[in-house]
Structures are given as structure tokens and as C-alpha cells.
């Protein structure tokens, strides 16, 4: 069996978690000829409600599209982290916004946890808070290593408005660099 | 000049299903006469109805005819017009069908200003089901479900249609059939949603409960409670209490018709695609 | 020829409808079906078709029926609460014998229930939602690609048998965004309603004696010259109301028989790894994807289990389930509700098999693990 990788993106409506999941899935399908599914879960509260996007990337057609053995979790909000962490595999990679999510001690033991002030970095270093999701995509790509970095760039270009492309590319590259640094700190 | 009605009627389906003297026949005759004067081809006309006595009308005419569910004539008529925009589409149904169970569709058709003609055969009662009160049953009169007299206020169909955006609105009655025919003719010619409030007699279900069991007496009564716009202009509010003003209230050819708007939408979409 | 795309189930229903020749859509916004009208509001005008958002669910189904009468292939889409409102209209299409496709993107219920969450709880509503004796065709696709291909089949069956067809998808399939390889339209047979060839004055829409059990019905090109009457009342061959007992009963039976006599053409199902199986799972729609994973896992543990999956869920594949009941002592029924198809399996298996269940009405999909545990328990 080839690649079968399950990712979950959770947060609150408006943070762009759904789009982050879509970009990862589209990069896999359109630019790497893999199979991918994305299952969004949402509420009618478009801004501020809990959101979850499960993305599965595989070399083979995907039978059951709900993520049940998760390899990677991105969480930008405490409540949804607590709600949706239950399906994580032993040793899964967990990336959270350290300014928004507190990770209990026991979770650190089970999973490979990375924390970074993602939203704050997008707001002050990149210059626009809406790039937080793309910054997180960059970190995701670096931490998981499942997709080619250039292919993800193409998928981002397909999805973000042209006027914001440069800014988003900056966020993406920054995300990759931050993740590299975090990995190095862990000796990886 | 007499009209050859056999050109319009499905003669093998006669006699009509209606009680002797029923106003439905008078309204239907006014409609067919207006169509004859316009010289329209039967193939170009669709007539749609909901449920009720008057809703049986389309069955007798040799057009494209569609007898739908209670209250649901207007969405079907709207669809037929959208599918065949050069057809003439007429809805022929009762006051209960059009203003109670189908009231939502009535106001939204008026709002869209789609080119269909809505003829409300307004006989103040649910005839077919046994004389229950409708939104147009005059307050104080009796119905099988208002044995002590109707306490419900009524709709004014003309004001309802005006408020909802219909671009042709008229009221006539079976007591003055030529005038009714003229209004219907103008409504059919109008490009946009046209509404005719056609006051009609149900001497059986409304009349018998209200001392007008005789059709002639009821038609005379309807005549006595209608006043022309010109006359009404000279009467006080008190004098107009309980009266039905007849005439053409709205005739506005300037508002955009819906199938035209949709045609332009298609052109825009196809130019871009 | 195929086209690789990433799309969700709702978009695939919309595109398949266009491919099948649907040129009239009427609807009212309801979660989780909304991407169907959103997509068609863009696409219909491009292909010269009609898209209309109506004032309510009832107007939408009636407009779609009106368009079908006027010769158009038509569709409406909704979810559980809207399907309840459309039921009188579905009965009208049954009685008038007008082709119509109704998409029901199932969500939790009763009432407003769980608007954004999955269920399969409209299974019985699809069959018995409208009043009166009638037969209905309902199809439940399981995957994204099936959502596309089964939408086309829904139109084909509607046109061929002059009857409403329900397409039962669900909230998961609707919003599942994934890779699909859409075959070129030339790979599909597209069925059109049979056209009358008799002079217009000799045409009647229900003239069974002359035309057979399913009389021709004018399409949009021929419609203008064929004037005919249709009603929701019990009708004679001319389309006029009748209360003649003999005619009424013959017509009621014919409307059911036109489907049941052609069941071989209408039925569709899948047998998955049943040949050497000791235990059988029966599941449909998206839930069958969980069952498939569970079966593969059980097989890898040496448990011989298979699945029977109805794709045409109505009429219920009674003969097939009866045959299976003679072979399998143990049948597991799984569906995302508290037991609806279960009654059909119980009825069709005539007590031959012991029936177990994996049922759930929690707004979330049943997981492969839940089905696997039941398979293991039953196999002990």
C-alpha cells in the first residue's frame, strides 16, 4: 500500500481552515495526480462557529472519506481542538496556534506537538491576519513532507485573489521557514 | 357579432360541471370572447388552474390545459411561461385557491411581473368543499364554517395585487359581463403580471346561506354592491363601506417583464461563457 | 475520455443534470443542498436553460412539474423538511405520469433536526411520503462518481417510465470534496421521452390501448402542437377526471405495473465479496463506504463477510434479499437512522436469517470500526 495520509484542520469559521484543507487536497489531485478527499463539517454560524475539514491524501481511491486515523492536526482554536483531537493516531503531528490553544501535558506525551503564534505572526510579520491559514499551510507542508512545496504554491495561486498572491506567497514561505526552525529545535 | 364557441370548447366534454346559473360560466365566456376578439390561436394558449369549482374551467377549453393541486396553479403557469415565453398563459381559479392556500404564489407572481394573467373567480366562498369561508367572504355573512356570520376581515384583491407589484390590475363582475370581457382583454394584451378580480355568483354555497339562493337575485345584489371608479370618486368613505369598486386600477407598461429579464440574463451568461 | 476534477457531490448532481439534458431547475434554499442551485444558477443560463428560485419548496416542485408538462426535463432539489413539503407535488407527478427528478440531500430529523449533519432517515419518506397507492423509484449513490452517473440514470428512468425519480444523497456526499474522473458524456446513453407521431387531434396522454403501458409524451419541440389536458384527479385515457370504478382501478394498477413489470431494467445493486461469505452486510448510500472498509478489514482478519448494496433502493430489491436470506444465516443491516430499510429486509427475508443491526442517528457517519465490531461479534 502506498501513501495514505489523514489531515484534520480545525478552528472557528473565518480563520480559513476550510480553504487550507482545500488547497492541500487540490495540490494533491491537480499537481501530484494523487487521490484526495475533503469533508467539511460546519455550522450555520459562518463566522465564529466551529469548523473542521478532514483531508485524506492517498495513492489509491479513498473508500471512507471521514478521517479516523489522523496523521496530522492543525488547530487554531481551543474548543475545536478539544472537540476533534480524539481521532489522532499515536505519534501524530499536532500543530497549534500557541497563542490560542493550550495543550495539556498528557497530549504532549502522545503526539508530536508544535506550537507557534500563527495568527499573530500573520498579522504583524506578514501584515495581514487573513494570511494565517496560508502560513499554516506552509508549516503543514514542511512538517508532514507529503507534498512537493512548489506544487502547493500552484494550488495556492489557483485559490487566492491575484491581488493578494504575493502576500500569500510570503506567508507560505514564512510558514515553511518557521516549521524548519521548530523541527531543528526538536533536533529533527 | 357572435362568437363560435365550439372553436374554443372541447365539445365532447360538455355539459359543464357547474350548477345551473353559476358565475363560472359567465367569467369563462368573457375570457373566450376576449380571446376571440384578440384572434389568438388555440395552440398558443395555456390555461392552468388549482382546485375548486372554477378550477375545472380549463378542462373544457381546447388549449394546453393543466389542472394542478389546490393553490398551485401559479408556479406551474410560471414554469410554462418560462419554458415557452411566446405563449399566452392564463390562470383561472377561485378566491380560496388564489388568495388563501395559493396566496404566497399570488403575491410572488405579482412581484416578478411575469407575463401571465391571473383571473380570480371571486365568488366569496369555497364552493366545491361545501361553502366554507374564504379570505374574500364578506365579513358578517354566513358560511358553513361561520354559521354565526364571518368574523374574519377580508383581503382586497386589488390592493393585494397592487402592493405586490402587479402591473395590470382590474376588477369587474358577472353583473356587467361586457365590461368584464373588456378588462380581461386588456389584461391578456398587457405584458406583465395582470390580475382580474372577477366578482362572481355562487348562489348555492354562499347565496343560500345569505338569502340569495336565486342566481338572478344574487347577480343583482353583486351589481348593487359594485360602483365604478368615477362614481366612487364622489362618494365618502362611509358610503363606500362594503362596496366593490370596479375598473382598471393599475396599467403600467414600464416595469420590466420577467421572461424578458431572464432572456437578457441568458444572453449575458452566454456572451461570457 | 475522462476529465479529472475535484468536486463535491452537490456540484456533481448539478453537472450531471445538465449532461442528462435537464433544462429547467426550480428550487428553494435549504442546507445541505444549496450548492446544487448555486451551481445551476450559474450553469443553466449558459446552456439556455431555466433556473428559478421560487418563494417556497412547494412552488419549486410544482414549477418543475409544470416544466415537465411543457416538455422540459426538469429537476428540483431539497433536504428532509423540503421533501416533506414537496410530497403532494410528488404525488401529482405520479398521477399525471410526468417525468421529474427530485434530489433529497438527507440530513438529520425529524423537523429541522440537524441541518448540516448526515443521515439516511428519509428512506421511508421517499417511499411513502406522498399519500395514496403509488410506486416510486429512488436511487442512493454511494460515491462521488456514482453521484454523477446515478443522476443521469435518474433522468433516464424518469423519462422512460414517465414517473418521478428520487435521488437520495446525504450531507456527507453533498459536501465531500474529492477527486473524480468524469467520463465523457458520449459514454452515457441519454434517454428522451417517447414522442407521439399521431396527428395532434388523435393524441391523448394516457391512451394505453393505442400506445401501450407508457404512452408517448411531447417534448418541448413538439409540445406546442399537441394540446392535452392533465389533472391530479384519477383520469381516463384523455386526461379527464373519471370516477368509473373499473377505469380507476385499472389505471392505479397500471401506474404501479409500469414500474414493477420493468423491474429488471430499473433495479441496480452491487454484490461485494459475497461468494464465499458466511455473514452478509446490507448497506446503501455513503454508509456503504464504511461497510466496504469494515469488510476488507474483517477479511484481512480471516472473517468471511460480504455486502449487498442496493443502488436502486426503491422498489426494494425484494427478490435478491429473499435469495440471500436463504444463503445467509446472519445478516447485518446498517444505515444512518434508527432502522428503516431494516423493515424491508425483515419482510423480504421472511424469517430465514437472523438479523443484526448497526444503526445510528447521531448526525455523524457510522465508522468502519463500528461495523467491523458487529461483524466480529456476529462471526463468533
Image: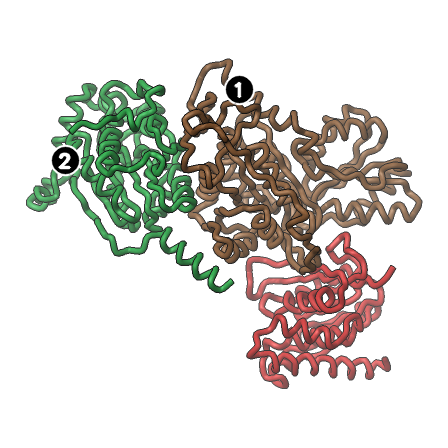
Chain colours: A red, B green, C brown
Element class at badge 1: helix
Q: Position of B141 compared to C206: left or right? A: left
User: Quarter holding the C terminus of chain C?
Assistant: top right
- Using the image, tell me which numbered label, if any, was put on residue B104: none
**Residue at x 67%, y 77% (from the top left corner):** A135
Q: Position of residue C368 (x, y in %)?
A: 79, 49
Q: Nearer the viewer, residue C52 or B59?
A: B59
Quarter assignment of residue B129: top left
Mark 1 highlights which residue? Answer: C209
Q: Position of residue C317 (x, y in %)?
A: 72, 31
Q: Nearer the viewer, residue B209 or B110?
A: B110
Mark 2 highlights which residue? Answer: B226
Q: How many marks?
A: 2
Q: Position of B85 compared to B136: left or right? A: right
Q: Is residue C28 above or below residue B50?
A: below
**Residue at x 42%, y 22% (from the top left corner):** C241
Element class at badge 2: strand
Number of other residues with Cα within 10 Å of mark 1, as a class: few under 14, some 14 to 19, many 20 or more = few
Amino acid at each position: 500500500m502506498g501513501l495514505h495520509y489523514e489531515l484534520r484542520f480545525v478552528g472557528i469559521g473565518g480563520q480559513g481552515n476550510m480553504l487550507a484543507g482545500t488547497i492541500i487536497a487540490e495540490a494533491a489531485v491537480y499537481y501530484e495526480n494523487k487521490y484526495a478527499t475533503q469533508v467539511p463539517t460546519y455550522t450555520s454560524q459562518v463566522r465564529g462557529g466551529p469548523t473542521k475539514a478532514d483531508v485524506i491524501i492517498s495513492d489509491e481511491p479513498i473508500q471512507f472519506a471521514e478521517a479516523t486515523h489522523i496523521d496530522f492536526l492543525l488547530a487554531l482554536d481551543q474548543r475545536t481542538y478539544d472537540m476533534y483531537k480524539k481521532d489522532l493516531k499515536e505519534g501524530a503531528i499536532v500543530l497549534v496556534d500557541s497563542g490560542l490553544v493550550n495543550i495539556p501535558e498528557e497530549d504532549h506525551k502522545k503526539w508530536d506537538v508544535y506550537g507557534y503564534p500563527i495568527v499573530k505572526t500573520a498579522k504583524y510579520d506578514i501584515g495581514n491576519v487573513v494570511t494565517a491559514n496560508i502560513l499554516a499551510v506552509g508549516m503543514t507542508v514542511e512538517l508532514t513532507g507529503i507534498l512537493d512545496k512548489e506544487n502547493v504554491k500552484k494550488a495556492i495561486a489557483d485559490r487566492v485573489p491575484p491581488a493578494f498572491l504575493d502576500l500569500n506567497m510570503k506567508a507560505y514561505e514564512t510558514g515553511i521557514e518557521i516549521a524548519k526552525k521548530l523541527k531543528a529545535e526538536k533536533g529533527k | 357579432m357572435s362568437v363560435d364557441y365550439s372553436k374554443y370548447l372541447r365539445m365532447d366534454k360538455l355539459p359543464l360541471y357547474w350548477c345551473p346559473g353559476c358565475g363560472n360560466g359567465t367569467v369563462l365566456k368573457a375570457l373566450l370572447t376576449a380571446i376571440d376578439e384578440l384572434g389568438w390561436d388555440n395552440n398558443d394558449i395555456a390555461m392552468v388552474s388549482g382546485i375548486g369549482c372554477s378550477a375545472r374551467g380549463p378542462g373544457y377549453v381546447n388549449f394546453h390545459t393543466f389542472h394542478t393541486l389546490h393553490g398551485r396553479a401559479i408556479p406551474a403557469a410560471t414554469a410554462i411561461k418560462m419554458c415557452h415565453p411566446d405563449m399566452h398563459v392564463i390562470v383561472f381559479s377561485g378566491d380560496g385557491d388564489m388568495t388563501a392556500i395559493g396566496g404566497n404564489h399570488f403575491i410572488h407572481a405579482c412581484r416578478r411581473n411575469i407575463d401571465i394573467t391571473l383571473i380570480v373567480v371571486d365568488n366569496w366562498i369555497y364552493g366545491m368543499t361545501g361553502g366554507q369561508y374564504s379570505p374574500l367572504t364578506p365579513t358578517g355573512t354566513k358560511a358553513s364554517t361561520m354559521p354565526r356570520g364571518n368574523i374574519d376581515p377580508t383581503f382586497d384583491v386589488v390592493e393585494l395585487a397592487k402592493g405586490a407589484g402587479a402591473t395590470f390590475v382590474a376588477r369587474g363582475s358577472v353583473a356587467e359581463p361586457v365590461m368584464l370581457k373588456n378588462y380581461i382583454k386588456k389584461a391578456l394584451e398587457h405584458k406583465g403580471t395582470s390580475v382580474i378580480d372577477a366578482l362572481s355568483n355562487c348562489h348555492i354555497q354562499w347565496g343560500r346561506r345569505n338569502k340569495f339562493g336565486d342566481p338572478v337575485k344574487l347577480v343583482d345584489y353583486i351589481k348593487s354592491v359594485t360602483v365604478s371608479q368615477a362614481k366612487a370618486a364622489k362618494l365618502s368613505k362611509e358610503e363606500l363601506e362594503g362596496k366593490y369598486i370596479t375598473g382598471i386600477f393599475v396599467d403600467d407598461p414600464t416595469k420590466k417583464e420577467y421572461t424578458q429579464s431572464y432572456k437578457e440574463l441568458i444572453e449575458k451568461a452566454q456572451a461570457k461563457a | 475520455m475522462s476529465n479529472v476534477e475535484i468536486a463535491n457531490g452537490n456540484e456533481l448532481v448539478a453537472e450531471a443534470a445538465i449532461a442528462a439534458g435537464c433544462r429547467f431547475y426550480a428550487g428553494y434554499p435549504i442546507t445541505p443542498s444549496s450548492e446544487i442551485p448555486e451551481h445551476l444558477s450559474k450553469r443553466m443560463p449558459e446552456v439556455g436553460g431555466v433556473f428559478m428560485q421560487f418563494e417556497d419548496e412547494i412552488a419549486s416542485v410544482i414549477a418543475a412539474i409544470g416544466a415537465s408538462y411543457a416538455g422540459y426535463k426538469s429537476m428540483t432539489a431539497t433536504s428532509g423538511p423540503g421533501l416533506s413539503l414537496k410530497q403532494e407535488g410528488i404525488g401529482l407527478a405520479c398521477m399525471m405520469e410526468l417525468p421529474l427528478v427530485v434530489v433529497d440531500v438527507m440530513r438529520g430529523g425529524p423537523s429541522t433536526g440537524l441541518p448540516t449533519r448526515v443521515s439516511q432517515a428519509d428512506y421511508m419518506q421517499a417511499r411513502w411520503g406522498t399519500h395514496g397507492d403509488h410506486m416510486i423509484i429512488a436511487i442512493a449513490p454511494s460515491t462521488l462518481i456514482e453521484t454523477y452517473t446515478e443522476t443521469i440514470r435518474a433522468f433516464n428512468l424518469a423519462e422512460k417510465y414517465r414517473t418521478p425519480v428520487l435521488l437520495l444523497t446525504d450531507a456527507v456526499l453533498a459536501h465531500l470534496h474529492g477527486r473524480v474522473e468524469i467520463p465523457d458524456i458520449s459514454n452515457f446513453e441519454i434517454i428522451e421521452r417517447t414522442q407521439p407521431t399521431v396527428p395532434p387531434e388523435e393524441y391523448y396522454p394516457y391512451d394505453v390501448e393505442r400506445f401501450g403501458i407508457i404512452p408517448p409524451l411531447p417534448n418541448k419541440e413538439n409540445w406546442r402542437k399537441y394540446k392535452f389536458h392533465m389533472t391530479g384527479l384519477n383520469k381516463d385515457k384523455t386526461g379527464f377526471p373519471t370516477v368509473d370504478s373499473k377505469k380507476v382501478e385499472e389505471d392505479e394498477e397500471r401506474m404501479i405495473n409500469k414500474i414493477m413489470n420493468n423491474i429488471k431494467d430499473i433495479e441496480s445493486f452491487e454484490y461485494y465479496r459475497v461468494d464465499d461469505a458466511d455473514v452478509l452486510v446490507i448497506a446503501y448510500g455513503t454508509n456503504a463506504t464504511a461497510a466496504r472498509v469494515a469488510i476488507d478489514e474483517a477479511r484481512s482478519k480471516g472473517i468471511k463477510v460480504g455486502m449487498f448494496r442496493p443502488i436502486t433502493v426503491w422498489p426494494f430489491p425484494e427478490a435478491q434479499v429473499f435469495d440471500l436470506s436463504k444463503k445467509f444465516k446472519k445478516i447485518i443491516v446498517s444505515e444512518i437512522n434508527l432502522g428503516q430499510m431494516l423493515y424491508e429486509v425483515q419482510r423480504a427475508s421472511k424469517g430465514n436469517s437472523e438479523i443484526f443491526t448497526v444503526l445510528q442517528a447521531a448526525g455523524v457517519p457510522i465508522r468502519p470500526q463500528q461495523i467491523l465490531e458487529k461483524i466480529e461479534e456476529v462471526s463468533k
